[in-house]
Amino acid sequence: MITRVAPTEFLIKYKQLHDSIFSGRLVYQRPFQSLDWDLILIPGRQRFGVEFSDALEKAGRGCGDHNVIVTDFEPATATPHQYSIVMEWDSKAFWEIGRELPCLISTNYHVFGRSGQWGMICYFDDFSCVGGTESFMQTITGQLGGKDTLRQQFLDHAQQEGWLLTNELVQQILAAAGWNR
């Protein structure tokens, strides 16, 4: 089930939590408030496979999160959080985001749980950055084959023909996750 959240409702119910998780900085500048959180990089931004969605759900539920909050966030925009939803965990839920909020297809957006123990930034540039507490990250990386597997999947994605990021920017992003070549 997906519930739309009006901008004023987001500001009242979720903004303080959101701002305690996300720093507003770019991925290569440490995008989460907690500098202790590990990061992983995931190819894609919306049409995640079932394996990733299930791993995210298991890790999120392990933190006590029974649903997910999604909100637009474009640093250059003066009015973020205009398009927000709360959705129940479902391996296909991320596929529904674009149908429910088509504007998120062309902007960056944040995903997080009420626990405040993790967050995900889905970049318009066709990749996502996940960060969280040690236990959250151990669960999600363990479910996805470990950090080395995730690093290789991201590197393969980064080398695809037509990806719009420059090699220099890719190197900065990899460094932020501690995945330097």
Image (cartoon, rainbow, N blue to C red):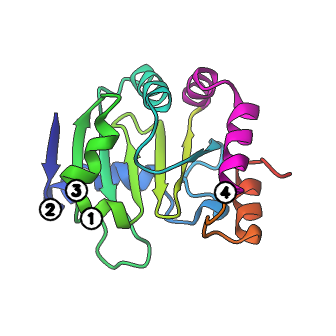
Mark 3 or mark 4: name the one nearer the start of the chain: 3
Q: Are marks 3 and 2 in contact (CB under 8 Å)?
A: no
Residue pointed to by mark 1: 103
Residue sitting at 67 percent across and 36 percent down?
150
Residue 94 to residue 14: above or below: above
**Mark 1 burial class by Cα count in 10 Å: few <14, some 14-19, many 20+:** some
Residue sitting at 29 percent across and 26 percent down?
66
Q: In the image, 168: left or right of 118?
A: right
Mark 2 or mark 1: name the one nearer the start of the chain: 2
Residue 156 image offset from top left, x and y in percent: 71, 47
Residue 68 image offset from top left, x and y in percent: 31, 38
Using the numbered discs, state the Cα–Cα distance from disc 2 to disc 4 in whole angstroms: 40 Å
- What amino acid is found at the position of numbered circle 2 in the picture? Thr
Q: Nearer the viewer, mark 4 or mark 1?
A: 4
Is 153 magenta? The answer is yes
Q: Which mark is on residue 160?
A: 4
- What amino acid is found at the position of numbered circle 1 in the picture? Cys
Q: Which mark is on residue 8?
A: 2
Q: Nearer the viewer, mark 3 or mark 2?
A: 3
- What amino acid is found at the position of numbered circle 4 in the picture? Gln
Mark 4 or mark 1: name the one nearer the start of the chain: 1
Using the numbered discs, state the Cα–Cα distance from disc 4 to disc 1 in whole angstroms: 25 Å
Residue pointed to by mark 3: 101
The residue segment tinted magenta is: 134-160
